[in-house]
Image (cartoon, rainbow, N blue to C red):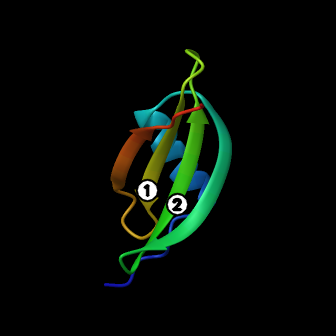
Amino acid sequence: MFRQRLTMQQAQDIALQRIPGQVLHVDMDLEHGVLVYEIFILTSQNRVYEVEVNANSGNVIKVEQEDLD
């Protein structure tokens, strides 16, 4: 069954459920043939996380803290 791709807003909502904070930036990228949203979130602790969300399934693929150095 074909499913509609997630909107950027839906992807942000999914990412914010995992890492609460403020969305700084959203990219869309092709990784290993899979379309993913890369959502960068600033937390209240001043940490930046990248959350990758599969654009088709809505699954969180990766959560990674970014180095700000």
Count of numbered circles on the image: 2
Q: Looking at numbered disc 1 in the image, what kind of residue is underneath it?
A: Val
Camera-nearest residue between 68 and 63? 68
Query: In the image, what residue occupies the spot 41% across and 41% down?
Result: 64
Question: 17 above or below 30?
Answer: above
Q: In which quarter of the image is residue 58?
A: bottom left
- At 54% from the left and 24% from the top, the residue drawn is 47
* Residue 45 at x, y percent in the picture: 55, 15
Q: In this view, does 54 lie above or below 68?
A: below
Q: Distance between the residues labelled 1 and 2?
A: 5 Å
Q: Which residue carries the number 1 mark?
A: 53
Q: Residues within 10 Å of mark 1 (few under 14, many from 20)?
A: many
Q: Measured from the top left, where is residue 10 in percent x and y? A: 55, 54
Q: Work out which quarter of the rendered image holds the N terminus and state it.
A: bottom left
Q: Along the polypeptide, which appears first: circle 1 or circle 2?
A: 2
As drawn, the residue found furthest toward the top would be 45
* Element carrying mark 2: strand
Measuring 56% from the left and 24% from the top, which residue is drawn there? 43
Percent across and percent down for residue 18 are: 41, 35
Q: Which residue is drawn at 58% across and 66% down?
A: 28
Q: Relative to residue 22, is residue 35 drawn left or right?
A: left
Say if mark 1 contacts mark 2, CB within 8 Å.
yes
- The amino acid sitting under disc 2 is Tyr
Q: How crowded is mark 2: few (under 14 residues within 10 Å), some or many (20 or more)?
A: many
Res 37 label? 2
Foreground residue among 4 and 41? 41
Secondary element type, mark 1: strand
